[in-house]
Amino acid sequence: MAEPRVKTELAADLARARARLAGNFDALRRDVDVPALLKHSFRQNKAAFIGGATLFGLVLSKLPARKKKVYVDRKAGEGVREIEKAGLWLIVLQFLFKTLRPMLTSLVTKQLSDFLKSRARKGG
């Protein structure tokens, strides 16, 4: 007879523990919601945020610009000339391909159609 009462008490304890856990989880979710906390903080302290952003921008604008150092390797001149020659050849080949493309297309089309016709005669 004591068992049903113990089960009821355990069920009630479990329900209370679940309710506490849900409440703790909601509180944790509110504490971790950084965008909401920032919005609330900004609403409460607008002047401080705007003043801080202005000061930060002023400090950034007064920092000197980074000067990039460029090192020139004197031995690299030969490599540059070779690349220039390769680039010129590439331009010439590209021009030739664009010029001869219609002829190449018709030649490949004719060869392919002849090949397919001969295959059809042999297979049929």
Image (cartoon, rainbow, N blue to C red):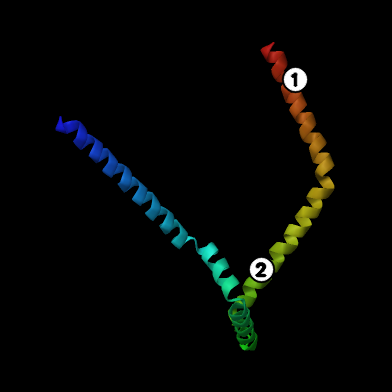
What is the CA distance from the residue labelled 1 to the residue labelled 2?
A: 47 Å
Relative side of 115 to 43, left or right: right
From the viewer's side, name the closer residue of 3 and 68. Answer: 3
Q: Nearer the viewer, residue 19 or 117?
A: 19
Coordinates of residue 7 in the picture (x, y in percent): 22, 35
Instruction: Say left or right for 93 vs 64.
Output: right
Instruction: Find disc 2 in the rendering and name its residue.
Output: 82
Image height of 66 relative to 9, above or below: below
Kindly identify the residue that appears in the image at 76 percent across and 30 percent down: 111
How busy is the neighbourhood of tag 1: few (under 14 within 10 Å), some, or many (20 plus)? Answer: few
- What residue sits 69% from the left and 63% below the top? 86
Q: Which residue is mark 1?
A: 117
Q: Position of residue 83 (x, y in %)?
A: 67, 67
Q: Which mark is residue 90?
A: none
In the image, 19: left or right of 55?
left
Q: Nearer the viewer, residue 44 or 12?
A: 12
- Residue 73 makes an appearance in the image: no
x, y percentage for residue 120?
A: 71, 16
The residue under the point 63% across, 89% down is 62
Spot the residue most to the top: 124
Which secondary structure, mark 2? helix
- Amino acid bearing label 2: Glu
Contact between labelled residues 2 and 1, with CB atoms less than 8 Å apart: no
Identity, as a three-letter code, of the amino acid under mark 1? Lys
Quarter occupied by residue 46: bottom right
